[in-house]
Structures are given as C-alpha cells and as structure tokens.
Amino acid sequence: MSLPIRQTDTTALVSPDDYLRLEGEAVEKYEYYYGEVRAMAAASYAHNRICANMTVAIGSQLRGKACSVVGSDQRLQILNGSAYVYPDVTVVCGPPSFNETRKPETLLNPTLLVEVLSDSTADKDRSEKFMLYRQVPSLQQYLMLDSRSLLAELYTRQPNGNWLFMEISDPAAVLDLGSIGCQVPLAEVYAGVEMPA
C-alpha cells in the first residue's frame, strides 16, 4: 500500500490518519514518530525469552488484582497522536483507557512500560522512546532490560515529576516495581537466556 505523504525539506512525512490506515491493512507492525513511519525489527530469541519471562513473572503476581499485563501487540498512543508505539510489555492499573476512534484499540494509560534492548533499538529506547514515554501522565515506571547482558535500567517517576534512575546488574537483585505492586527477581527475568561471552 502506498501512503499519501507530504514533503518537508528532505524528509517524507505521513499524517497520523494515514499511518493508522496503513496499520489497519498491514501484516507487519509499524511505529509512528512525528510523521515518520518505522517498520518494527525482528526480535532475537533472547529478546523474546526476556519478554515472556517478564510477562509471566508480572502476570502471576497481578492475578486477581486491579492491574493487568499485555504484550507487544498492544499499541500505545502518546498524548495528541504525535507518536504510536508498541512497547514490549505494558501494565495498566485500573480500567484501561482507549482512543476509541483508533482501531484496533489504542491504549492511552499505561502504568509500567518495559522495553528489551537490542543492538538496533537500545539508543532509541533510552533516548527517543523515553522522551515520548515521559509525556504519558499515567506512566509511573519505565524498565529497560538488555538482551545482550544481565542489566536492568529502571526509571521511577517521583511525586515532584522528576525521574529516579536505578541500574541493576546483580543476578541476586530484585526489581522493585512498586507502581504495580510487584517484586521481580532479576534472575527470573533472565532465566534460560544465554548471554554472549
């Protein structure tokens, strides 16, 4: 499918409506950043295993509670529609809120977002995506998990709006996901994942 685009300088931009129409017809997933449509890269086995481990660890602790976890097929809208992204793991506490005009359902109110870092995504996940995620009023924590080494980077929003950063690499450590009432051992997150020598 070809999209109508508007040319500005050397960058071809797509409107949010055109992006969403493409998403409705596409077999692959695409993310949208301020007019730029980006294909999602294929994930490694380590990436997928970390996502699955994290989803199981969180999901088992959230059973019967007011929070729920969903995987990487859940699209998230950033504020006014300037960006649409697919986090690796999303947790919503309380009733999920959706942009009802955007099909399939587009989530608006995550509490915790998790991204698994790879060679191709690490820089964007640490900078561009975190800048976008900070614009989501409901977001309380942002967790990045490296797929190439045993490393977690956790940002927690403070009452004054600032973000507290913690870097965790001790396999005996426990991730404090207080925003969703979960404690997750780092070793559990990386279970079955072979790290490069």
Image (cartoon, rainbow, N blue to C red):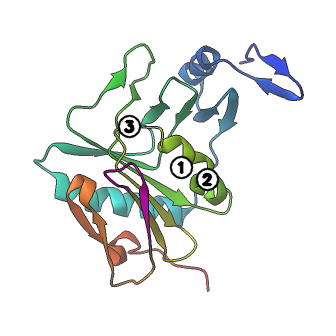
Q: Callout 3: few (<14), some (14-19), or many (20+) C-alpha neighbours within 10 Å?
A: some
| Image coords of residue 99 (percent x, y) | 39, 20
Q: In which quarter of the image is residue 164?
A: bottom left
Whether residue 76 is situated above or below residue 128 in the rendered picture: above
Q: Nearer the viewer, residue 62 or 127?
A: 127
Q: How far apart are marks 3 and 1 (CA)?
A: 13 Å
Which residue is tagged 3? 137
Q: Which residue shows up at 21% across the image and 32% down it?
A: 95
Q: Callout 1: few (<14), some (14-19), or many (20+) C-alpha neighbours within 10 Å?
A: some
Q: How far apart are marks 3 and 2 (CA)?
A: 18 Å
Is residue 95 left or right of 8 when viewed as pictured?
left
Q: Nearer the viewer, residue 27 or 98?
A: 98
Magenta stretch encompasses residue 165: yes
| Image coords of residue 45 (percent x, y) | 53, 63
Amino acid type of disc 1? Phe
Report the span colored magenta.
157-166
Q: Which residue shows up at 34% across the image and 39% down it?
A: 138
Which residue is tagged 2? 127
Which residue is tagged 1? 130
Q: Which residue shows up at 48% across the image and 43% down it?
A: 133
